[in-house]
Every structure is written in C-alpha cells, then in structure tokens.
Amino acid sequence: MKIPATLQTGIDRFKQASRPAQAGMTAAGLLSIFVLFNLMGGGADNSFSGPTFVAREGKLDIVVREGGNIEALQSQQIRSAIRGGSGVKILSIVEEGYRVTAEDVTAGKILVELDSSQLNEQKLNQQIAYETADATFIERKAQLEIRINQNVANLNAASQRMRFARLDLEKFLGANVVQDLVNRLAIEERLARTQAAQAAATGTTTDRDARVGQIQQNREATRQQGRNGGARGSFDPASFDPSDLSALPAPMRERIEQMMAQNNGEIPAEFLARMRAGGGRPVPGGADDDASTLVRVEDSSDGPSDTEPEVIGLAGSDAIALPPATEMLMDNAYLSLREAIDFRIYASENRLEDGMAKQQLRTLQEAVRVAEENNLQAQARYAGQERLAARDFITPNELEAERSRLLQAESRLEQAITDLNLYTQYTFIKDADQQLANYEDAIMSYQRTQAEAAAELAQAEARYKSAVQRLELEAQRLADLNEQLAMTVIRAQRPGLVVYGSADTGQPFRGGNQEPIQEGATVRERQAILTIPDMTEMAVRVNIHESSVQRVAEGQTVSVRIDAFPDMRLTGQVIKVAVVADSGNAFMNPDLKVYPTIVRIDGEHDWLRPGMTAEVEILVASLENAVYVPIQAVTYLEDKQVVYVSGAGRREAREVQTGNYSEQFIEITAGLRSGEEVMLLPPRQSSQIAGQAAS
C-alpha cells in the first residue's frame, strides 16, 4: 500500500516549513515519541525497545482535517468600472467594518466616490465631437434630399427634351414613319432597359454592392487591356484621329465618310465633339481637359450583351462600370442598324404622312405641276404664234418674244423638277437624318443625365451613411462617458458588512502589488474596492490535498472549530468541491496540488466574521467493529505491509491487510486481532529514538 494521505500531507507541510521550524518539529516529534514510550511502559520491559499500542476494536470515524478561512456564501463585490490604464483615485470611502442597513440602501448612501475630473474633461471634448457629427449629419441629410430632388428635376428636363425631339421628328416625317424607324432601331427596347437606373437616380434603393463588385472586376480587365495595347478591333474615342479613320469600326467609318462628303470633306464639329466626349457625356473641368475626359471603351462585336455591363472610364484612370440598365445608344449594334436606314424610301407622298416633309414635297410637286402646265401653255402659244408669223400676221419680233416666254417656261419647269429631285435626294434625307440625330442626341443626353444622377446619388448616399455612422459612434462614446461618470459614485445596494478589497482572504497577498484600499489610493478597472458579505450564510473555504480529494464529496457532514473560539464546535456540510487544482498556490510549491472546497456552516452566528481562521473535520466514513492501530505502526518490509507485534519477550513482523484510514488511525482488515500489542516504529528506528531520548 502507498503512503497514507495524512502521512503524505504531513510530509508536504514539513517540506514547506522553514529550517528553524523543521528543527522544532523534529525535536517535538522525538519528545512526543519518548513520552508515549514511557507512558506505555516501554522502559519497563527490556525485551524490546520503543513505544507500543494495543490494537483496538470498535467504531472508527474516518475524517479529513484541514484548516481554512471563514467567508460569506453570498456577497456583493464592488469593482472599479472606470476604464483607463492609469486608474482613478478614491476621493472618499466608507470605513471598513461599517454595517450597511436597509435604511442606507433606501436612502442611497454613498459608499465610494471616485475622482471624475478627467472623465468630465473627456465628456466636454466628446460633447463637441458629438455636436460636430450631428451638424454634419444634418448637412449630409439635406444634401441627399437636395440631390434626390435635383436628380428628379434633371431627369424630367432631359425626358422633356427627349419627348420634344421626338415630336419634332414626328412633325417632320409623321408619327407612323417615326414609329417604324424607332422599331427598326429598337430605341424603345433600349430605353426600357434604363428604367431601373432612373428609379435609382430618383432615390430608390439599389444593389450598390453588386455595382462595386462590377467596378472591381472591370478595373483589372481594363488595366490588362491597356497593358496589352487594347482589345482587338476596339476603338478608343479619347485617342481618335480625324485624319485616320482606319481604326474605326466599319459601320461608323462609312457613316462618318458620308457626313464628311456632305460637309466639304470635314467631320461636323458637333459629331466630333460627341465622339470625343464618349457619346455626349460632359467633360469634367472643360472640354480641353484630356486627362479627365470621359470615354467609352467599345468592342467591335455585334454589341454588348444584355447581362454584361458597358464600361465607361476616365482616360488614364480606372474604369467605372455602369449597370446594364444604363446601356448607351451609340454602340456598334445601334450604328449597324442606323447605317441601314435609307430615308429615300420615305421620299414619296405615299410613304410620308402629314408633316413638314410631306408639305414641302407637295409644294415642290405642285410647283412642278404648275411649271408643266405653264410650259404646255407656252408651247401652245408659241405654236400659234408661229402659224400667225407664217401668214405675216405678226412681226418677227413678236414671235421672238413668244419664243422667249416659252424658254422661260421650260426653264422654270426644269428648275421645279430639279428642286424636287434635290429635295427628295438630298435635302429631305439631310433634314430627316438631322431630325433623327437630334432625337438620338436627346436620348443620349437623357441616358447621360441618368448615369450622372445615379453616380451623384451614390456619392450623396455614401456621405450620408458615413455621417450616420459617425454620429452613432460619437453618440455611443458620449453615452459611455456618461455611464462612466455615473459609476464614479457607488451607492449602497444591499445590507451587509463592508470589507475592503476582495473577500477572498484565502489569497496570501490580498490585492497583490496594488495599493491598499483607502482614500487617495488608485484603483484600476475591475479591481475590487468593497465586498459586502451576507452575514446570514457563512462558510469555510479549505484546500483539500490531492491525496484526499477523492474521498471528499458534496453532502458530507463536517465539524468546524473556530480558532478564535476554540470551545465552540459548529456543524456544517460540504457544498462544493473544485474539479481542478488551485493554481494560486503553484508559486509556493509547484508539486503541491490542492482543491478548493466550500463547507457551509449550519445556522446563523453573529460573532462570525469573514477572514477568521477555522479547522474542519470532514467525516468521509464511519466504520463499525473495526480493528485499528495508529497509522505509523504500519510499515513496509520487502514490499509487504507489516506490523511488528510485541509479546512473550520477542518481536514479530506480521503481514497485514489494511483498509480505510484517517490522519491518526488505519483499519486492519486481516493479520491482526484486537488486544495484540504492536510497535509504533520499526525495531531499529525505535532503538535509535530511545537512545537519543535517554541521552
């Protein structure tokens, strides 16, 4: 059997003692053994040497005995809640030992007052920061509302210009002809895809995270495209050279060549400006600011898909992705359809509706008809004059005058026919194309206004959200400071006895290296200032050695003795046994493992105070009719547990079997009978101790 727990506990305590204490303990042990030897008659019988004990049979209580300190089961621990590494000073504190009454709780008696000067200064600065954030919030909110209203006004104006441009086109060609053109160019379908952007520009919430993701995805693609010299077949309007049209897509190049043919070999200034601005988008900082000109990066394919966003970017900077709903009008797909439009097919009275073009066409046709009739009449008159001249009824001069009138009629007829042909072949086509271009420009202006409104609204929303978050942050900081200021005054919340610092007086150095709790002392965050224990329920906190903790369990009966009142015996009960060892004692002896245990004291005792020293005896077992001897009588001999039985002038080493044990006695379950006398120490050690005692 291993060394009993009580013997091991004694060895551990002996090791923890100082050298003078160890010497004193050794001398006291030798003296007690010598006295016990004389009392038991060891010196009367010379047949053996050393103290003996007669084995007994009866009731044996197995107890675990430990010392500890009194504490309250329930207590209110008041800690400093003031944040800051430097801590805060105690301005006033109630005296230790003061008993807080129910009247104190009702009246809100101040127990502790902490220095609040630094917090008041921080609150003043935070109040200024909060008011600044509040003013910024109000400003950004007003700016957002103004931006929404301005977006609505801008979009309404752009939409009105677009409607007026279509009315002008219909006024010129007729509603059905214009609708046919719109259907062929799919203008209405393109405009329908911009309604989501219009809703965003007027203040409707959109998925801005997805748009930011598109920006990030397209940004690297645009940079890579720039490093690779541009996509194959792509066109960059920012680098457009009017003298070199080879880089343009075929439909765009053909259209520009036609326009140049009608403009004395030069590109119209308005169309050129529109191309340089990326489809009519305004230029930040002026039209001459090439570094910030907005341009379009267009592919030479059949046009953008319905799902991929069109890329709009700043020349020399990162690209910005517009949502698919803001698809611009002047792309390659549209230009291909646009170039397929031939207005000559509409240059007839049957195709045109009532409008300016048809009215002009009728006027010219009427002029031709009148000229034809005048020419026929002139021819008839000249023929009659010729017959009269042949009969000498008129003079040659009169015939020549009639011939002049005929030539004038023929000339007017040719002029009327030429005017009609010029109108149908050139003027009508030019005017129709110009009216359609005006309508296209109005559409692109509307789309540009839409994109600008969405971008400006996004910026206004971002600034507004930032102001909201800043205001919330400053408000939270101000609330925290107000809460901290309220915590500088600690009032009574429950009756009890005031104890400074932690109520855990079992710690060898209360508060560690912190200042003792008193007026003028500095306390840090979460440092205990006061503890108000509930004196109606008291307990003893003890540390059970690891060799005995397995025998201690909740619910076991306990006898409690208070050192200050040694004649008073209290009863109690184990209510808690720690499952892990206490690490607080590791610095004293890393090899010593103890488990904190709480013993509740039965009843109420006004004379008990937290911190009193007490000794507990935990009853772990009660054996009936047990044979037992002192625990030091059992020793080891060749890995066997033996006792030395003394009798008939001889000593016998007898093997025994042991059972439960306490700090003083151990149960013998086999090998020894009641009444037999055993030596308390092995024979050789007994002789040595007896010789030392005699000397």
Image: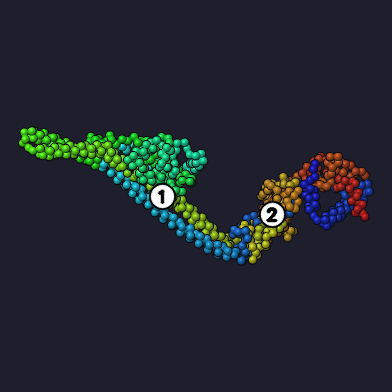
Label ID, residue 540 = 2
Which type of secondary structure does the marked residue at label 2 adopt?
Answer: strand
User: Gap between marks 1 and 2, in whole Å?
Assistant: 89 Å
Instruction: Decide if residue 200 is in sight here.
Output: no
Image side of residue 394 versus residue 84, left or right: left
Is the residue 236 above or below the residue 570 in the image?
above
- Residue placed farthest to the right in the image? 46
Is the residue 526 above or below the residue 281 in the image?
below
Q: Which of 272/455 is in front?
A: 272
Please state, as top left, top right, bottom left or bottom right, where the C terminus lies in the image.
Answer: bottom right
Q: Which of 465/65 is in front?
A: 465
Q: Report the residue at 72% width, 45% height from top.
A: 551
Which type of secondary structure does the marked residue at label 1 adopt?
Answer: loop
Classify 10 Å Cα crowding around label 2: few (below 14), some (14-19), many (20 and above): many
Q: Where is residue 141 shown, x and y percent of the image?
A: 43, 55
Q: Report the residue at 10% width, 37% height from top.
A: 396
Of the residues under marks 1 and 2, which one precedes in the sequence?
A: 1
Image side of residue 556 versus residue 404, left or right: right
Is the residue 322 above or below the residue 120 in the image?
above
Inspect the image, locate mark 1, and give the three-letter code of the amino acid beneath it.
Ala
Indicate the quadrant where residue 610 lies. bottom right
Inspect the image, locate mark 2, and give the three-letter code of the amino acid beneath it.
Val
Q: Where is residue 306 shown, x and y percent of the image?
A: 41, 37
Instruction: Decide if residue 89 is in sight here.
Output: yes
Of circles 1 and 2, the one toward us is 1
Indicate the quadrant where residue 176 lies. top left
Residue for badge 1: 287
